[in-house]
Amino acid sequence: MPESVKFICLRCGHNFVADYTPKVVEERTCPKCGSNSVRRQKGKAAEKAAD
Amino acid sequence: MMDAGRHPRIELFTNSQVENVSGFVGNFNVTVRKKVRYVDEDACTACGECEVVCPVAVPDEYQEGFSSRKAIYIPFPQAVPSSYVLDMENCLGTNPIACGKCADACEKECIDYDAVDEVRELEVGAIVVATGMQPYDPTEMDEYGYTRFANVITSMEFERLICAGGPVEGHFIRPTDRKTPKSVAFIQCVGSRSLNRGVPYCSNICCMNTVKDTLLLHDHYPEMQNKVFYMDIRSFGKGFEDLYRRSKEAGVQYIRGLPGDIEEDPKTKNLYLTVENTLNGGVERHEVDMVVLAVGLVPRTDSEQIRQMLTLSQTSDGFVMEAHPKLQPVDAPTKGVYFAGCVESPKDIKDSVTQAGAAAARANILLNDREVRIEAITSIIHEEECNYCGRCVRVCPFHAITPANKKQGVFPKVVEAACSGCGTCAAECVTDCIDMRHFEDAQYYAQIEAILAEDPMQKIVAFACNWCSYAGGDNAGTSRLQYPANVRLIRTMCSGRVDEDFILHAFRKGAPMVLVSGCHFSDCHYIDAVTWTQQRVEKIWDKLEKKGIRPERLQLEWISAAEGQKFAKVMRELEKLRQAVTEEEVAFTVDLLIREQKPTPKRRTNRDTLALLN
């Protein structure tokens, strides 16, 4: 089941939430700049982004 | 079908399922389960005595449920072989009560309730995949009332009703009162060209199928009023525009707009369609006796199994992907496998026949050559450094590496005929014991060092895959698009070849920015190699962050060959990022990575590789 996960674009720095299914590798795109350098935020980084 | 069934050199497996495929081009081993028919197909004369006495009646799938069939039946009139088959799920012959009437009625004694499936092992040189598609189920489009209103049918159901061999022998009637309708509405693009429900693509055949249906109705019932609700009529193809014109001349009313709602009169069972006519902007209400939904074509729900067995890749819409859309339109990325028909994309009969002919010719060329010219770029395993981890076997998109067995001292082996040279195994190998012919590690290190030998702070190192990103760069160049001149491209056959060590080596040599770029997932020429690229880059981002290096300095981008604009835009954006990288952080990175550098891996050269081969 997909879960909502925080991502950060390493091109423009945009933080966003998108569906993420563990073990499913999908092409991801930043909704702001269109870059594919999109990194899933884990642990403290995700908490920091939430703040 | 009958010609194929009679051909002395064609063995036809009907009612059968492919269970496993192994091997490689020219040497495939296929396991086929020939499902039991319970009727000896050679002895059966299709006299029909068994069907007459069978007491079971179930909906006939071939007639879309408009009529019934018996538990022992011939699936459709032209079925090959022309022999009965017993549907054991519905048969009373063995369970729960013994019926046995068909066996008693069969003079040839060809019914055997105890028969079992037969499993056959075949050795074949080439495989043609022609598993077709399935029509879209419009039940979810509730506004059209399919399954709520009996007089709303699909185009497939229409075909059965209008067919002379159908349940009503071609006398077109509406289901509620079994009378010939006075007016029929066709609604186009049901499930097609929709981003919300159904599929986003055009299903190709529905427009001309509807035009044909309207002419059929006009020929059979000249007084009948036919209306077609459409977005666009796509009548490209030989003779199709003429057919469309004939339909309009025959009085078929074409209304540009798709109904937003269908209501049913509870008494008459007539249907009311509310539609915005986009040609005049008015909202119209049309009363008709029947509605036919021109449903789109979607990939088969069970296509995943065959896709996995043959290591085929699929496009974003779920159909299988060809090796090259223009130059190898019937070839699969897996060598020796070809496509025919709607398994590759929705297409009409003419296109399916054309593609099937091409696939047969391609297979014929392969088989007649009696030898296969394989890819020169293949991987080599240096066994002395292998630790039997088996990662190369797991990541190979083509299943071209045979498994290792540490206990028996069996190293993984590359089946060169199956290897397509993506290099994912080489990049993922933890002991660096795999190399690629013509794209060796030593060559990459040499390129990186040459690029960064002078003024590295000004350079951007970009790994670009041969098929898409590198071609995207070409596209940008030939389109005269401007992008920073300090980008240095390193060509790889696939982005899956970009080893973590290459990226770290570039940073170690002072690169401020590194880009890994490849094909979009749906365009990957090596099935799913690109997914390994993404996973690897994500891991490297984590590692860089742990080391105190900004992960932003490693960028990832999917650029297709047609996206010259995107290529130039990405390079301009990278240049902006590069300008933000300070000399201090590059110095810190270089110092850190030099300190952490493992003993220099042996730089193999072409000479080493040749020595290994000899």
Image (cartoon, grey):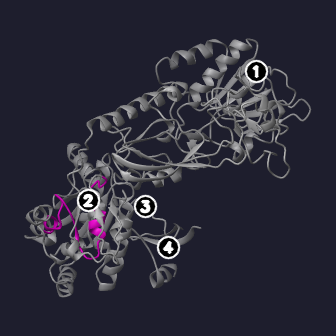
- In the image, B96: left or right of B6? right
3D distance between C-alphas at marks 4 and 3: 13 Å
Residue labelled with disc 3: A29
Task: Give the residues drawn in magenta, as a range.
Answer: B418-445
3D distance between C-alphas at marks 1 and 3: 54 Å
Q: Is residue B225 visible?
A: yes
Q: On the rendered image, what quadrant is the N terminus of chain B found in?
A: top right
Q: Secondary structure at mark 4?
A: strand
Sequence-first tag of 1 and 2 = 1
Q: Nearer the viewer, residue B571 or B100?
A: B100
Q: Establish if B25 lies above or below B410.
A: above
Residue B169's disc is: 1
Indicate the amino acid at tag 1. Glu
Indicate the amino acid at tag 4. Lys
Callout 3 environment at 10 Å: few (<14), some (14 to 19), or many (20+)? some
Q: Looking at the rendering, which quadrant does residue B34 occupy?
A: top right
Residue labelled with disc 4: A6
Q: Chain of mark 1?
A: B
Give the label, 1 or 2, closer to the camera.
1
Q: Chain of mark 2?
A: B
3D distance between C-alphas at marks 2 and 3: 18 Å
In the orientation shown, which residue stands out farthest toward the right?
B267
Q: Chain of mark 4?
A: A
Disc 1 and disc 4 in contact, CB within 8 angstroms: no
